[in-house]
Image (tube, grey):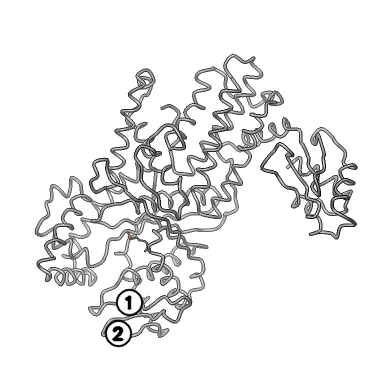
């Protein structure tokens, strides 16, 4: 800002345009060979009619500009006035700012006093926690981290799929195929097993479906016996989920679920009735959204036997959350396949005259294709994580000497494995589908999770290896090399990158930036030696690497990774 202010201040005197408006006209060219900053003269027209031809004016203004310690050179190219700044001063001021902010670099207070509800992950009990839920989990967690870092109060909710006819089916299945021991050992796997078996059986015994419906009706009517088994399935599954979430570095403020919406649904039905929004259709209740633009069809909200549906439970959940948290905004992180569902939901809430229906957002994402274990069998996320971890351990063992130095190899391997999975996922834009690729994901070369972790650990090792430590009053004017300047300007961009990621709800923005940062760090590593340099130079360079490490660490944390100090 120092430099922009200097330019604005001089131009304000030349043009009589206020400094603040001039600041809006100054640009930072991507290619820094020509200029560090530029002022396109025609832009000034926005604020004041120019007294002549822009190219001529550019020459005139440039001739009157007084060079000083901040601005070293002024040239003209067409209607552009180009400036070269004192790069060392910029490098110094960036690094001082980063040092002062520390792990708060990139954070703001823009969300203070505002509450945001973010619902994500939301797996279905008794069904595999699959790739779709993995994406929801890590994208949702990323959004929680970003919103919190910008000062928002976030309520994170896991809205479990734990209600509906399939739980009637599961109970009947458990009666036939279940085993207490297997359930306790691995509830998610066992329940899925039972669920598959009973579904197969029901193909030849279709009456099982009627029994399941009746069972679920009992559950919804509050029959204690029916609820007992279900509640056990639910509790055991949550315990297991928590283990997986722990590995993924994810926590929830609240485990909610479709099952908790019964009371809310009673008042939702009342309101829908009162507003005349529901119609009878052969004993069932529907809401006609075919008049909406675009046509959203007819939505079933109550079955003939009086039981509820997925969307009915969502209607109740939304108003319960508004009452409970009085959110400014609520975000649902759910696969793009459910887009129609959310459009219908938001439209129904709008017709129910909830003004806050405008503050709801569905954040969707594409599919992960080909996610299976290396043997190609069906996948539970846990198997993917375990397999990645064991491959990581094998790789780490290859470097015997380094491996011996690691205190907790098992934990490190797990962290690198999880990083690999998350970074592979975030390497594509959220809305794109991508192919799950074992080799690419786990490689230490190329733009991968292990590579980012390695870059961080390497930065951490500088202090250990050189014995140089952080001296905040190091003489930073010694950082005169273009590589030092390039690295510093990338570091400077971080807060803006966080804002872009926030505006687009896009983890890929951060990942792309971190790769760029790490490429520059790696160039700086070979060009700007700390070891062997004279003490004051070594200290100045160390500040540069220290700041790079801080930014990398902040970025990795935002993505939900645990930055490693050794690996
Ligand atoms: N349990 C659902 C599924 O796995 C996702 C829930 C999404 N959230 C919601 N409020 N409908 O498909």
The residue to which callout 1 is attached is 300
The answer to whether the beta carbon of the residue marked 1 is less than 8 Å from any atom of ligand 1 is no
Q: Is residue 171 left or right of residue 552?
A: left
Percent position of residue 504, x then y: 53, 55
Helix, strand or loop for disc 1:
strand
Q: Is residue 516 above or below residue 329?
A: above
Residue at 18% from the left image edge and 58% from the top image edge: 195
Q: Is residue 337 above or below residue 374?
A: below
Q: Is residue 126 left or right of residue 197?
A: right
The residue to which callout 2 is attached is 281
The answer to whether the beta carbon of the residue marked 2 is less than 8 Å from any atom of ligand 1 is no
Q: Are marks 1 and 2 in contact (CB under 8 Å)?
A: yes
Q: Give the Cα distance between marks 1 and 2.
A: 9 Å
Where on the picture, by quarter, is residue 30?
Answer: top right
Percent position of residue 349, x then y: 44, 73
Q: Is residue 341 left or right of residue 383?
A: right
Percent position of residue 222, x then y: 22, 69
Ligand 1 appears in which quadrant? bottom left
């Amino acid at each position: 800002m120092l430099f922009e202010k200097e330019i604005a201040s001089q131009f304000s005197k030349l043009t009589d345009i206020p400094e603040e408006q001039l600041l809006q006209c100054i640009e930072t060219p991507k290619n820094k060979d020509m200029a560090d900053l530029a002022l396109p003269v025609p832009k000034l027209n926005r604020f004041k009619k120019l007294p002549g031809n822009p190219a001529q004016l550019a020459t005139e203004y440039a001739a009157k500009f007084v060079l000083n310690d901040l601005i070293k050179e002024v040239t003209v190219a067409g209607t552009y006035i180009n400036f070269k700044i004192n790069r060392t001063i910029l490098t110094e001021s960036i690094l001082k700012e980063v040092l002062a902010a520390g792990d708060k670099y990139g954070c703001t207070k823009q969300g203070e006093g505002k509450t945001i509800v973010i619902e994500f992950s939301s797996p279905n009990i008794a069904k595999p926690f699959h790739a779709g839920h993995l994406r929801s989990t890590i994208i949702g967690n990323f959004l929680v981290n970003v919103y919190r870092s910008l000062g928002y109060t976030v309520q994170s909710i896991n809205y479990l799929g734990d209600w509906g006819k399939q739980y009637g089916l599961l109970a009947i299945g458990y009666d036939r195929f279940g085993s207490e021991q297997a359930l306790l050992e691995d509830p998610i796997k066992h329940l899925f097993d039972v669920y598959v078996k009973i579904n197969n059986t029901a193909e030849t015994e279709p009456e099982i479906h009627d029994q399941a419906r009746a069972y679920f009706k009992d559950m919804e009517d509050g029959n204690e016996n029916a609820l007992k088994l279900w509640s056990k399935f639910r509790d055991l599954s949550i315990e297991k989920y928590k283990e997986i979430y722990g590995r993924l570095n994810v926590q929830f403020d609240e485990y909610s679920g479709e099952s908790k919406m019964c009371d809310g649904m009673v008042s939702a039905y009342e309101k829908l009735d009162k507003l005349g929004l529901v119609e009878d259709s052969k004993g069932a209740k529907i809401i006609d959204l075919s008049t909406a633009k675009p046509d959203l069809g007819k939505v079933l909200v109550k079955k003939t036997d009086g039981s509820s549906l997925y969307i009915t439970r969502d209607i109740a959940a939304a108003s319960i959350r508004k009452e409970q948290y009085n959110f400014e905004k609520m975000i649902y992180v759910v696969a793009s396949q459910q887009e129609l569902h959310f459009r219908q939901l938001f439209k129904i809430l709008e017709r129910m005259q909830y003004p806050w229906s405008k503050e709801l957002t569905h954040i969707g994402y594409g599919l992960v294709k080909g996610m299976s274990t290396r043997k190609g069998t069906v996948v539970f996320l846990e198997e993917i994580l375990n397999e990645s971890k064991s491959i990581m351990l094998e790789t780490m063992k290859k470097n015997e000497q380094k491996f011996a130095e690691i205190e907790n190899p098992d934990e490190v391997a797990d962290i690198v494995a999880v990083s690999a999975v998350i970074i592979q996922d975030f390497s594509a834009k959220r809305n794109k589908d991508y192919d799950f690729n074992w080799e690419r994901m786990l490689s230490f070369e190329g733009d991968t999770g292990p590579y980012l972790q390695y870059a961080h650990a390497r930065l951490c090792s500088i202090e250990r290896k050189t014995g140089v430590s952080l001296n905040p009053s190091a003489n930073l004017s010694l950082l005169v090399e273009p590589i030092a300047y390039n690295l510093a300007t990338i570091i400077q961009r971080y807060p803006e990158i966080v804002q872009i990621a926030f505006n687009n709800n896009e983890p890929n923005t951060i990942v792309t930036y971190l790769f760029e940062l790490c490429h520059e760090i790696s160039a700086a590593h070979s060009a700007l030696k700390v070891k062997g340099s004279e003490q004051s130079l070594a200290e100045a360079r160390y500040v540069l690497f220290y700041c790079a490490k801080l930014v990398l660490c902040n970025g990795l944390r935002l993505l939900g990774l645990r930055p490693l100090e050794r690996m």
